[in-house]
Image (cartoon, rainbow, N blue to C red):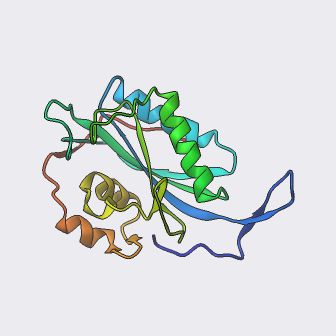
Amino acid sequence: MTETPNPNIIDADTLTGEMRPIRRAVLALGSNLGERLASLQGAVNALADTPDVWITAVSPVYETEPVDCPPDAKTFLNAVVLIDTTLAATRLMDRALAIEDAFERERSEVKNAPRTLDVDLIVVGDRRSNEDFLRLPHPRAGERAFVLRPWLDLEPDAELPERGPIADLLDQADQSGMKLRDDLVLQFQ
């Protein structure tokens, strides 16, 4: 991340009056089943419709070869979304899972099985978590070009906590099998 959230910048919950810090979060989107672009756009729309979430940027779309997937897996479309939010990381994770479910994401015993939609929390402010249901920062983001490249497009000076500048991490990652899709654009308001 380019900055640590300023604890003095807060938002008041309209129902309870509780003051909560605004945090920057990075989410990675991916799809390799069904209408891939429609699923990514649907995820962006659902995030935009989430109370206490404000989308600040959406990356270009990349088409990528599957990484650590079953042999018959099709190519992915991937993008990164930057948001500001007052949601707790656990509530943001719940929302990400609900969005995946809305796009009929099927969970399977097969590691990295094909999916209609994947919404991963990469970073949520300076929050750290090593719980089974929530690992922050995302433990494999620093090795995945399909996360780092679109994130770098949005924030060239960003850093992955505990790992370093994403530009340096991207230089070390395998970028083969990635193609910028200028013909595919995700919209946000």
Residue 135 left/right relative to 19: left
Residue 178 at x, y percent in the picture: 19, 47
Q: Quadrant of residue 29?
A: top left
Q: Is residue 101 visible?
A: yes
Which quarter of the figure is the C terminus placed in? top right
Q: Residue at x 64, y 75 (%)?
A: 6
Q: Residue at x 19, y 62 (%)?
A: 173
Q: Quadrant of the N terminus?
A: bottom left
Q: Position of residue 84 (x, y in %)?
A: 59, 58
153 left or right of 75 in image: right
Image spot of residue 129 (x, y percent): 50, 66
**Residue depicted at x 26% and y 69%:** 169
Residue 167 locus on image (x, y percent): 28, 69
Q: Is residue 189 in view from this perspective?
A: no
Q: Work out whether 57 lies above or below 127.
A: above
Q: Residue, x 18% and y 36% (percent of image)?
A: 70
Q: Is residue 134 left or right of residue 152?
A: right
Left or right, residue 162 beside residue 19: left
